Amino acid sequence: MSGASATLGQWLAENGDLDRLDRELVASRALKLTRAQVIARPDSPLSPSQRQSLDQLAARRRREPWAYITGEKEFFGLRLAVGPEVLVPRPETERLVELVVERAPQGGQVLDLGTGSGCIAVAVKTHRPDLCVTATDVSLAALEVARRNAQCHAVDIEFRQSDWFSALAGRFDWIACNPPYVADADPALNDLRAEPSIALVGGPQGLAAINAVIKGSGAHLASGGTLALEHGHDQGEAVRRQLADCGFAAVETHEDLAGHPRVSLGRVLAGGQG
Ligand SMILES: C[S@@+](CC[C@H](N)C(=O)[O-])C[C@H]1O[C@@H](n2cnc3c(N)ncnc32)[C@H](O)[C@@H]1O
């Protein structure tokens, strides 16, 4: 951190622990300039209050993702409100949405389990208004954010607080879930400290929530219904095995845009389990 830079160019040079792009975005937001103006005006003098704004915003950026600073994130072409109550929606999760949008039966019942910001439910309902979408989370604070996003995009979704399946009755044609799947001791958690741990941490191997959702899904899927789960890039084999062990058929894994195995699907046979 600087605190004494005389010009914008000096401030940018003195905060090299942040990426160049981050520094430019911080300057753009703190000084109400476009990024092009920030780049073109290295000699602009800084007043003490401008330096203070720059330093305060840079300090926030060191702790928080951009989405929490701006209060929004783009997901599946939609602008969604986000805050520290919810996981910032990731591009990987768009693959899960694509599969539901492409494959869910006309007029079907879809459940988004662990909805967080509501990104999956809102994106699915926006692109498939014929579907009846229910979205749950154990976190009331997350459900508030998800409700706001549904309202903002004018989509009708039933929200319910539920510890996985505890408050759910009835059966669904598709269950889509992006559960917490990072292993307890994964060093990657250090970089994710600003996001709620309940949205991230999934037990010693990161498979605790995944396994709970697979075990509980059979009793909540209609005949021929599908469970679609996002998981870590190295968890595909374990997830497929668990799906098969729990009686799911047509088990398959799809890659995300980066080419990593990311979403696994399984179908319950006629009659469903449980
Ligand atoms: C990885 S985040 C996914 C959020 C959002 N669906 C997305 O894709 O960005 C996992 C979500 O599951 C929720 N969750 C964690 N444990 C839960 C439980 N026992 N029952 C229901 N939801 C739970 C968290 O609050 C969090 O919102």
Image (spheres, rainbow, N blue to C red):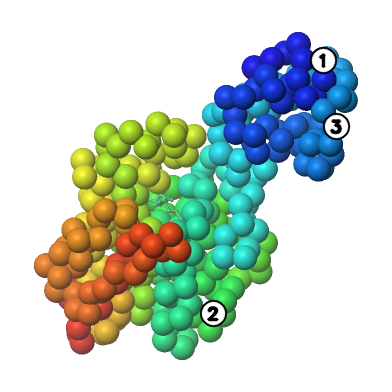
Tally the numbered discs. 3
Q: Which residue is mark 1?
A: 6
Q: Mark on residue 66? A: none
Callout 3 environment at 10 Å: few (<14), some (14 to 19), or many (20+)?
A: few
Tell me which amino acid carries mark 2. Arg
Q: Which residue is mark 2?
A: 128
The answer as to whether callout 1 falls within 8 Å of ligand 1 is: no
Callout 1 environment at 10 Å: few (<14), some (14 to 19), or many (20+)?
A: some
Q: Mark on residue 41? A: 3
First of labels 1, 3 by sequence position = 1
Q: In this rendering, which labeled residue sits more in front, label 1 or label 2? A: 1
* Image x and y of residue 169, in percent: 32, 70
Q: In the current view of this chain or complex, which residue is farthest to the left?
A: 245
Alpha carbon distance from label 1 to label 2: 54 Å
Residue drawn at x 48%, y 47% is 87
Alpha carbon distance from label 1 to label 3: 13 Å
Q: Is residue 73 above or below residue 47?
A: below
Tell me which amino acid carries mark 1. Ala
Marks 2 and 3 close (CB-CB < 8 Å): no
